[in-house]
Image: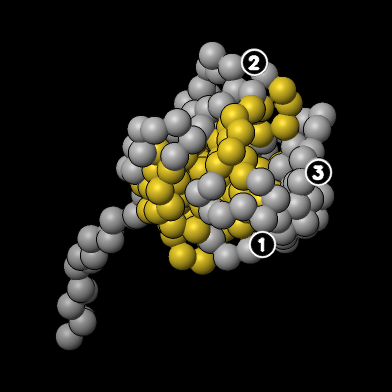
Amino acid sequence: YIQPLHYFTLHHSDKTHITMSVLYGNPVQDRKIVDTYSNYYQVDYNVPFTKDTSVTEIEFYAKKALPIQFIVYRPTGAKMKFNVIDKTPLVTPKVGVYKFKLATPMKASKGDVLGWYVKKTGVIPFDYHGSGKTSYTAIGGGITAFIQNTGRIYSVRVVEPPPPPPKESPKEPIEEPIEKPIE
């Protein structure tokens, strides 16, 4: 069993901080292994989306600067069977922690999961974990043609965007007495 990370706090140099909610995924960090397959799909259902949301940013660790596409899948209830809900265009990240800001948000419902397609070899690193839940397709397999389960933990997550700063209320005009001219 993988303990989901539900909240984390970002600390700023000016001593302010914001707490963000993790809506999907695993801690983002450099991990030991990266996939060697190419032209295949992977789905990670270790920690599904925790609520209905619009995905505006996907954070992941990129071990390689190669094209990747993200897909929101909905489990059907049958083993390794998913429906495609939405997908992004291909993006080529920089190596390291990468925040992919989506030009058009993707819709996800509570219980949905995230997957990805890689054109060349793997991009997101993983560690083997006995209770990890991921599946992949054969090389050249279709977007939902998953053939194998694996015990892996990938460095990818979706966080709830921080709330916008509070709007300052318009200040009431201060009435100042007008001095009468001296006659």
In this view, 183 is above or below 30: below
Q: Is residue 82 visible?
A: yes
Left or right of 110 on screen, residue 120 = right
Question: Which residue carries the number 3 mark?
Answer: 36
* Residue that appears at 75% across and 37% down: 125
Which mark sits nearer the N-terminus, 2 or 1?
1
Quarter of the N terminus within the rendering: top right
In this orientation, which residue lies closer to the viewer: 2 or 120? 120
Which residue shows up at 59% across the image and 17% down it?
Answer: 131
Q: Secondary structure at mark 3?
A: loop
114, above or below 131, in the image: below
Residue 143 is left or right of residue 96, and the answer is left
Which residue matches tag 2?
Answer: 130
Identified by mark 2, the residue type is Gly
Query: Residue 163 or 109: which is nearer the viewer?
Result: 109
- Lower sequence index among marks 2 and 3: 3
Tell me how many marks there are.
3
Please state if 33 lies on the left or on the right of 102 as rendered.
Answer: right
Mark linked to residue 91? 1
Residue in view at x 59 percent, y 38 percent: 147
> Viewer-proximal residue, 92 or 119?
119
The alpha-carbon separation of the residues under discs 3 and 1 comes to 19 Å
Q: Residues within 10 Å of mark 3 (few under 14, many from 20)?
A: few
- Type of amino acid at the residue the image marks with label 3: Thr
Residue 120, percent across and down?
77, 56
